[in-house]
């Protein structure tokens, strides 16, 4: 238990340090690099590269390097993106965004595989139920990991100077689709010196994360990994490429696609649209960090809480809570006209969003680990693929659509996702009845 817990903590704090940098940068991209939509374009490129990476890189790297060195190497790709922000342009941000995207899928797949294997190994030794231990491990991980948003956003808010708000009539769901929501950054934003200080802190945080993984994380032994996961065929590019898509033959994976994509849509809206059209427009860019801290803090504590109570409530009740919370927020954002006098409201929305996101993250990750125990690498590669597609689509249309249209899109995706998830639970419940044939991992989609 001590060894397993140590490894879970090492991974968790490694991700905490890494995403203190990336999370802070992601929250600022739409406001900091608003010229010609460079910031959101770089985010869209990141997740487009993640899709390509998800198709073939995770099984290859996990097989060749093991989970530990896959995590360490992938973290270096995130550091490259921080360096690209020092001289932000189409010639620096886009290439480093591609590098980050290529490293993103192996990073998350290796992390999910490592925690799932560690949870199952400990459950076998302790005589516990594997999915309960896995839920607790993911809950602990997301408790620590999601707090990265607190530190990353706090750093940016403390470093950046105050800026004044612009025309409030162009803030909120019915934005004017003009420069009114971006002039704040351009006219009175942080100086180059402050930006360099911020990026220096973020880059250093990423370097420490790599050192922490390299020095303190135990490598999972080959025989342990092979006893817990089915070996992936990695003899050639095409066999690995097809492994990810062959997993789509499982009907359960197909039903999970909308839910997985919704995770990308909802995170992209908060990072790219809420921060720009509501916070930066009405309060100023220096408030982005403070407001996003409420999201990260709620997300962090709820991740641990829901990870622990999921064994008592079941995942269906938690998914229902997340659905109701997100729908309520979307409707309220459609009706609300942001104003600086309503300061508390700016913090309430991301806090509720963080509560819902904590459920989407912990329960969906754990659901993949439980349903696809024999095909973890391919399953988690699909998870990153479809979530990344949600990010790409959301960031891709960010500069072309009004905020209210984007809110309706997020709502529609959520409704489809929860209906498909309900169908999945129905199939799983049928499988539990005696005399029913167990669902095959290769049933037609």
Image: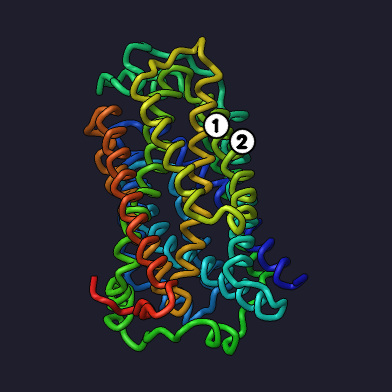
User: Nearest the camera: 243 or 213?
Assistant: 243
- Quarter of the picture containing the C terminus is bottom left
Residue at horizontal 45%, vertical 85%? 230
Choose mark 1 or mark 2, whichever is in front. Answer: 1
* C-alpha span from label 1 to label 2: 8 Å
Query: Circle 1 sits in a helix, a strand or a loop, which is it?
Result: helix
Vertical relation: 178 (above or below) 399: above
Regarding residue 207, the answer to whether it shows in the image is no
Query: Residue 366, how many percent across, how many down?
Result: 51, 62
Query: Residue 412, how many percent across, how many down?
Result: 27, 41
Pointer 1: residues within 10 angstroms few (<14), some, or many (20+)?
Answer: many
- Quarter of the picture containing the N terminus is bottom right
- Determine the image quadrant of residue 150: top right
Vertical relation: 197 (above or below) 365: above
Vertical relation: 360 (above or below) 64: above
Residue at horizontal 51%, vertical 13%? 342
Query: Residue 65, how many percent across, how many down?
Result: 51, 79
Query: Circle 2 sits in a helix, a strand or a loop, which is it?
Result: helix
Regarding residue 75, the answer to whether it shows in the image is yes
Residue corresponding to mark 1? 289
Q: Choose the circle earlier in sequence order: 1 or 2.
A: 2
Q: Are marks 1 and 2 in contact (CB under 8 Å)?
A: yes
Residue corresponding to mark 2? 155
Residue at horizontal 58%, vertical 68%? 115
For residue 393, the mark is: none
């Amino acid at each position: 238990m001590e060894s397993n817990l140590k490894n879970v903590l090492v991974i968790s704090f490694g991700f905490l340090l890494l995403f203190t940098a990336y999370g802070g940068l992601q929250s600022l991209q739409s406001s900091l690099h608003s010229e010609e939509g460079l910031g959101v374009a770089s985010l869209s490129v990141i997740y487009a590269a993640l899709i390509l990476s998800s198709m073939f890189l995770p099984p290859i790297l996990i097989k060749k390097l093991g989970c530990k060195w896959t995590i360490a190497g992938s973290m270096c790709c995130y550091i490259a993106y921080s360096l690209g922000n020092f001289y932000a342009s189409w010639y620096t941000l886009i290439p480093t965004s591609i590098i980050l995207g290529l490293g993103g899928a192996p990073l998350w797949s290796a992390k999910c595989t490592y925690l799932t294997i560690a949870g199952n190994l400990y459950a076998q030794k302790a005589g516990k139920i594997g999915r309960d231990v896995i839920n607790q491990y993911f809950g602990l991980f997301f408790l620590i990991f999601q707090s990265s948003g607190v530190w990353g956003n706090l750093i940016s808010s403390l470093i950046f100077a105050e800026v004044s708000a612009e025309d409030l009539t162009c803030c909120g769901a019915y934005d004017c689709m003009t420069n009114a929501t971006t002039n704040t950054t351009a006219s009175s934003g942080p100086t180059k010196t402050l930006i360099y200080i911020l990026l220096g802190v973020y880059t250093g945080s990423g370097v420490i994360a790599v050192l922490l993984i390299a020095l303190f994380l135990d490598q999972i032994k080959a025989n342990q990994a092979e006893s817990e996961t089915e070996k992936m065929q990695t003899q050639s590019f095409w066999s690995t490429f097809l492994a990810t898509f062959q997993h789509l033959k499982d009907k359960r994976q197909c039903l999970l696609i909308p839910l997985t994509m919704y995770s990308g849509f909802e995170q992209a809206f908060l990072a790219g649209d809420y921060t720009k059209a509501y916070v930066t427009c009405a309060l100023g860019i220096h408030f982005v960090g403070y407001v996003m801290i409420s999201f990260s803090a709620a997300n962090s504590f709820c991740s641990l809480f829901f990870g622990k109570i999921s064994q008592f409530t079941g995942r269906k009740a938690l998914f229902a809570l997340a659905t109701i919370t997100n729908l309520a927020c979307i409707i309220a954002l459609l009706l609300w006209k942001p104003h600086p006098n309503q300061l508390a409201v700016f913090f309430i929305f991301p806090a509720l969003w963080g509560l819902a996101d904590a459920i989407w993250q912990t329960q969906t990750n754990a659901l993949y680990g439980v349903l696809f125990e024999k095909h973890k690498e391919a399953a988690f590669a699909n998870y990153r693929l479809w979530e990344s597609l949600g990010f790409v689509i959301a960031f891709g249309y960010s500069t072309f659509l009004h905020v209210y249209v984007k809110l309706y899109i997020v709502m529609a995706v959520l409704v489809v996702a929860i209906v498909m998830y309900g169908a999945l639970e129905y199939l799983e419940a049928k499988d539990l009845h005696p005399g029913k044939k167990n669902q095959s991992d290769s049933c037609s989609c």
